[in-house]
Image (cartoon, grey):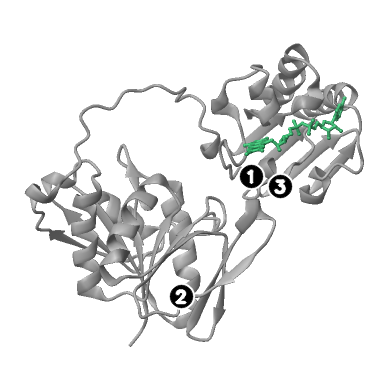
Amino acid sequence: MSKKILVVVEHEEGKIRRGSLEALAAARQLAEAWGGQVIGAVAADQATSLAEEFARRGADQVVALEHPALARYTPDGYRQAIAGLIEEIAPEWVLMAHTYLAQDMLPLVSAASGAPVLSDCVGVEIDGERAVFLRQPYDAKFVARTVDNGPAPHFATLQSGAFPADDLPENHGGTVSTHAVEIDAAALRREVLEVREVGDRTVDLSASEVVVAGGRGLGSKEKFDELVGSLAQALGAAIGASRPVVDSEWLPHAHQIGSSGQAITPKLYVALGISGAIQHVVGIRGAQCIVAINRDKEAPIFNEATYGIVGDVAEVVPALVAAIEEARAQ
Ligand SMILES: Cc1cc2nc3c(=O)[nH]c(=O)nc-3n(C[C@H](O)[C@H](O)[C@H](O)COP(=O)(O)OP(=O)(O)OC[C@H]3O[C@@H](n4cnc5c(N)ncnc54)[C@H](O)[C@@H]3O)c2cc1C
């Protein structure tokens, strides 16, 4: 029997979250190695159009799990919907992006069979019939190759940017079926009373294709604004920062990149005056191209960089901006 890989889809304001497309990319990797099938699950009050989109992007089959109680996420509502589907289709693996929702809900589902969740995985290797997931313990200083030797279903969550979704098809042609699920409303223990917007929603570095970030090496808020701001403007980029920049209150925390900030997956990331401490680097490993400018040629950021420029930001950045503007003018 061909192995089934189930991806639980997260969505927000009618859109599939990018992490779920990355989980789909990982699922395709497994399905192609095993000649298996990728199945998506979308839970919502009205899930069909999202399910159709997921089927276009590479799922072979998508189940729209619909019930009025699924209009908003609750762990018990999702647990009931997803656990029912798992029982019905018996997948080999259940994959999700490593998000707060997945950390909240997936252990509730996996606990039904006593299975562990392999969390925050950054890669996968196929070993015959087994999937060996790679994880990075101790702030990514090690790589742990991990298998789940228990019976299926197995569960894993995937780190943002670890499985790029860029190569997913636009017109895969998977099928969609809509299931009206049974939800026991009395079993929904958690209720969200109100959602208030508090953070700066304009700063979503995780969705930016180009990010220019500055570090302590910029020296002052004025220099940060001048140099990072001018390069970001020239490249049409979002602005990020290392932690000392945020600690010095040059920028709000919403701009911080790293283990206690955002993990980003842009096509281009430019680091100005950032040393490349591990706590920063774990937030940029999903970037496709990293350009680092640092006056210290031994700075660890150069170990991560695709292109490195050894030099003073005060000299290199204005020259870069001028070159970009000149190229644009031609
Ligand atoms: C629990 C914990 C969580 C953390 N979380 C995060 C996090 O989420 N994000 C994060 O970024 N950090 C985090 N940190 C802090 C992290 O360890 C580093 O201290 C921090 O990333 C260093 O920031 P930086 O590179 O801007 O500064 P520095 O390490 O001081 O580096 C400055 C760099 O600028 C270069 N430089 C100086 N002047 C110039 C110049 N004129 N031109 C060019 N280059 C120049 C220097 O050579 C140096 O490499 C965390 C730490 C801990 C303990």
- Residue 162 position (above or below residue 36): above
Discs 3, 1 touching: Cβ within 8 Å: yes
- Confirm whether residue 117 shows in the render: yes
- Residue 54 position (above or below residue 279): below
Q: How far apart, in angstroms, are the residues tagged by discs 3 and 2?
A: 33 Å
Q: Residues within 10 Å of mark 1 (few under 14, many from 20)?
A: some
* Three-letter code, disc 1: Lys
- Confirm whether residue 169 shows in the render: no
Q: Residues within 10 Å of mark 2 (few under 14, many from 20)?
A: some
Q: Quadrant of the N terminus?
A: bottom left
Mark on residue 289?
Answer: 3
Left or right: where 141 falls relative to 264: right
Q: Pick whichever of labels 3 and 1 is earlier in the sequence.
A: 1
Say which element carries label 1. loop
Q: Which image quadrant for residue 68?
A: top left
* Three-letter code, disc 3: Cys
